[in-house]
Image (cartoon, helix red, strand yellow):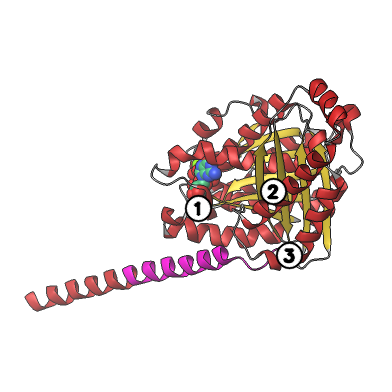
Amino acid sequence: MKLAMIGFGQAGGKVLDRFLEYDSTRGTGIISHAVAVNSAKADLMGLEFVPNENRVLIGQSVVKGHGAGTEPELGEQCAREDMEEIQSAIDRTTTSEVDAFLVLAGLGGGTGSGGAPILAEHLKRLYVEPVYGLGILPARDEGGIYNRNAARSFQQFVESVDNLLAFDNDAFKSGGESLHEGYSEINAEIVSRFGALFSAGEIEALGDNVAESVVDASEIINTLGEQGITSVGYASEEIERHDRGLLDRFRGANGDGISESGDATNRITSLVRRATLGKLTLQCEVDSTERALLLVSGPPEHLNRKGIDKARKWLEETTGCLEVRAGDYPLPNENRVAAIVVLSGVTDIPRVKEMQRMAIEAKENVEELQAGSEEDLQKLIEYGDDEE
Ligand SMILES: Nc1nc2c(ncn2[C@@H]2O[C@H](COP(=O)(O)OP(=O)(O)OP(=O)(O)O)[C@@H](O)[C@H]2O)c(=O)[nH]1
Ligand SMILES: [Mg+2]
C-alpha cells in the first residue's frame, strides 16, 4: 500500500529515514511522500533520505530551533503554531495516490510526544484516507519523565488515529550496550516488520508474480479498522536455494515432490506460531485481539495454500477472533521465508498499565519533592525567626 509518512520529532524522523532507505533499496514503492517535522534544527539536518524541501522546522518562535526538551506541552504548542507549514509540505503529495497516512513518533520526548497526536487529529479532519500512527514507547530504564510523557501521549495518540501501531523500545533493546547504540538495530527491526506489512499490500511491484492469495491494501485497512492498538509479530527462516533446474529433474525422476510440499506446510505453520507467541512489537495478551492478518512471504515454491490455511486456523483458535485474514507475498529472489502476524484491536497490554503506574509514581515523586522543599523553606523561615 502507498503511504504518506510523516516523521515527528527525532525518533520519528530517524525511523522515516530508514523507511525511505528500505523502500529505495527494495523498490517496494510504499512511500509516496515523506515529510519530517521537528522543533530541533540539528535533528532535521542530520537526516539522510528525506528531501530537503520536506523537512519542516516548527516552533521557532517558541524554542528557537533547539527542540522541546522532553516537554510535550511545548511540542504541542510548536505543532499548533506551525500546522499550516506542516500542512503545505504534506499537500504537495496530493498529486500522487495515497492509501493512508502514517505519523511516526517516539512518545517519550517532547516534540513527537506532544505534536504527533495533534497532527494526526488535523489530518483526520482533512482527509478521507485513514490516518495511522506508529508510536514508539520508551524503554523502562529511561525513567519516570519519559514514561509519563509516553503514557499521556499514547492515550492521546490512540484517540486521534484510526489505529496506533505500537512498538516498545524496551522489548527490543539489546542487553549491555546503551540504548543509544542500540537504536540502529531497533530501527532496522521496526522497518523490517512494518515495511514487510506495507509492502505486502503493494502488489504492483510484483509484476507478473501476483499470487492467487495476495493481500491488498484494502485488506490491511480492514484489519486495522477505525480504532485501536496494533501489535505485530514476526519470524523468518533461511532456506537453502538449490539449482532449480537440476532439482526439478532429480525430483521428477524420484517423484518425491510431496515431502517438499509437506516441509513447506510445516515451515509455514511453525513460523506463524513463532511470530505470534514470540516477541511482539508490543507485548499483549494474544487472546485480546479483535482482528488479525497473517502474511507469509518468500520464494513462491516455498509458499503453499495448505500451510497458510492451517496457520490461519491455528491463529483463529489462538486469538479467539473470527476475523482473521491471510495471504502470501511471493519474493522470488529472497532466501528466507517470513511470517508476519498483525494483531489489531488488542486491549490487554500490561506495558501500558505499567507506563501509567510509572507516570503516577513520577507525579507523586515530584509532589513529594515540592512538598519537601516547601517544608524546608518553612523550616528555614522559622529558623530565621528563632534567630531574631
Ligand atoms: N526506536 C527508536 N527510538 C528512539 C530513537 N531516538 C529516540 N527514541 C525514543 O523516542 C523518545 C523520544 O525521543 P526523541 O524522538 O529524541 O524526542 P523528540 O520528539 O525529538 O522531543 P524533544 O527532543 O524532547 O523535543 C525517547 O525517549 C526514546 O525512547 C530512535 O532512533 N529509535
Ligand atoms: Mg529532539
Q: Disc count in the image?
A: 3
Please tell me whether residue 102 is drawn above or below residue 381 in the rendered image: above
Amino acid marked by disc 3: Thr
Q: Is residue 101 left or right of residue 305?
A: left
Residue 22 placement (x, y as % from top left): 67, 30
The residue pinned by badge 1 equals 170
- Say which quadrant the N terminus sits in: top right
- Say which quadrant the C terminus sits in: bottom left
**Real-space Cα distance between discs 2 and 3?**
16 Å
Badge 2 local density, few (<14 within 10 Å), some, or many (20+)? many
> Which tag is nearer the camera, tag 1 or tag 2?
2
Give the magenta part as a residue range: 345-369
Secondary structure at badge 1 equals: helix
The residue pinned by badge 2 equals 271
The residue pinned by badge 3 equals 319
> Which tag is nearer the camera, tag 1 or tag 3?
3
